[in-house]
């Protein structure tokens, strides 16, 4: 039995950080400095590609569900509802 449910929650937390601090610097592989909004776009694009691949072991749709949760949380934080 393999449990794969935590990846969407971690994905939501990472994307919420990207939404809250889009100009922050993220270090990709400890050496490349990349703006957070670029990393967010790359993460989402990679998951869309994983959804289109039929033989992928990573569920892109689950990660995109985490992105939706991050978007809802970000909107609620901006409206001060959260």
Image: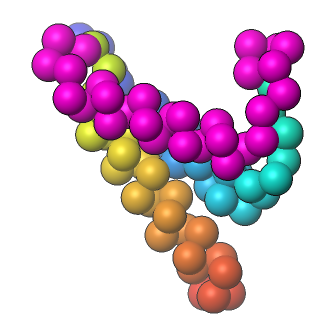
Residue 81's x, y, as percent? 60, 87
Viewer-nearest residue: 34 or 12:
34
Residue closest to the eye, 81 or 61: 61
Name the residue located 55 percent from the left edge and 68 percent from the top edge. 73
Figure quadrant of the C terminus: bottom right
* Residue 51, visible in the rendered structure: yes
The colour style of the image is rainbow
- In the picture, measured across the screen, residue 50 lies left or right of residue 31, that is left
The correct choice, above or below, for 1 with respect to 50 in the image is: above
Q: What stretch is highlighted in magenta?
A: 28-56
Q: Where is residue 30 in the image (x, y as percent from the top left)?
A: 83, 14
Percent from the top left, x then y, of residue 34? 78, 33
Q: Is residue 14 visible?
A: no
Relative horizontal placement of residue 18, taking residue 24 as reference (left or right): left
Q: Residue at x 72, y 62 (%)?
A: 20
Left or right of 54, for residue 2: right
Q: Where is residue 17 in the image (x, y as percent from the top left)?
A: 70, 51
At horizontal 20% and vertical 29% (from top left) the residue drawn is 52
Count of picture labels: 0
Quadrant where the N terminus is found in the figure: top left
Residue at (41%, 58%) from the top-left corner? Answer: 68
Q: Which residue lies furthest to the left in this view?
A: 54
Tell whether position 54 is magenta.
Answer: yes
Confirm whether the magenta stretch covers residue 48: yes
Between 28 and 68, the one lying in front of the other is 28
**Quadrant of residue 56 within the rendered picture:** top left
Query: Which quadrant of the structure image shows residue 25?
Result: top right
């Amino acid at each position: 039995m393999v449990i794969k449910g935590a990846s969407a929650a971690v994905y939501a937390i990472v994307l919420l950080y990207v939404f809250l601090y889009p100009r922050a610097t993220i270090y990709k592989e400890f050496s490349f400095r990349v703006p957070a909004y670029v990393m967010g776009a790359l993460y989402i694009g990679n998951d869309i590609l994983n959804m289109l691949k039929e033989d992928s072991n990573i569920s892109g749709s689950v990660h995109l569900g985490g992105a939706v949760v991050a978007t809802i949380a970000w909107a609620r934080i901006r409206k001060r509802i959260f």
